[in-house]
Image (spheres, rainbow, N blue to C red):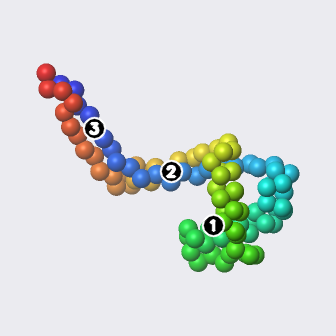
Amino acid sequence: MKIEVTEWHQVSSHKTYDWPDDMIIEEFGSLERLREIISHQEQQMFGGMDPEGEEPTDEETDKFWELTWETDYDREDDWWTDRKGGYDVTARVLDDE
């Protein structure tokens, strides 16, 4: 009999980018402007943080997220439900021969 067991986890993926300063300046005008744009992203996601500088335009926000999708990064996954044992498990029969 063939069966399948599925573990349903939650994971936090931490992606680290190493962008060259000259690319940042070309895309955003300055390193400081990118810091400001990022500070507004943090505000939206985590709350309680004071954003810096002017709120980014839609174009700046889109450009930032596009670069995260298009450039290489190092990734570290934190399977926090696996650590705690707080995940659901399901099982099913795939064939019954």
Query: Left or right: where does residue 77 sit relative to residue 80?
Result: right
Camera-side mark, 1 or 3: 1
The earlier-in-sequence mark between 1 and 3 is 3
- From the image, tell me which residue sits under label 3: 5
Mark linked to residue 41: 1
For image coordinates 76% across by 63% down, the residue present is: 34
Instruction: Return the x and y of residue 22 as percentages of the image width and height.
Output: 86, 51
Quadrant of residue 86 in the image? bottom left
For image coordinates 79% across by 60% down, the residue present is: 28
The earlier-in-sequence mark between 2 and 1 is 1
For image coordinates 82% across by 50% down, the residue present is: 23
For image coordinates 63% across by 75% down, the residue present is: 49
- From the image, tell me which residue sits under label 2: 78
- Judge by depth and name the residue closer to the eye, 22 or 16: 22
Mark 2 neighbour class, 10 Å CA radius: few under 14, some 14 to 19, many 20 or more:
few
Query: Left or right: where does residue 64 sit relative to residue 88?
Result: right
Instruction: Return the x and y of residue 3 as percentages of the image width and height.
Output: 23, 31
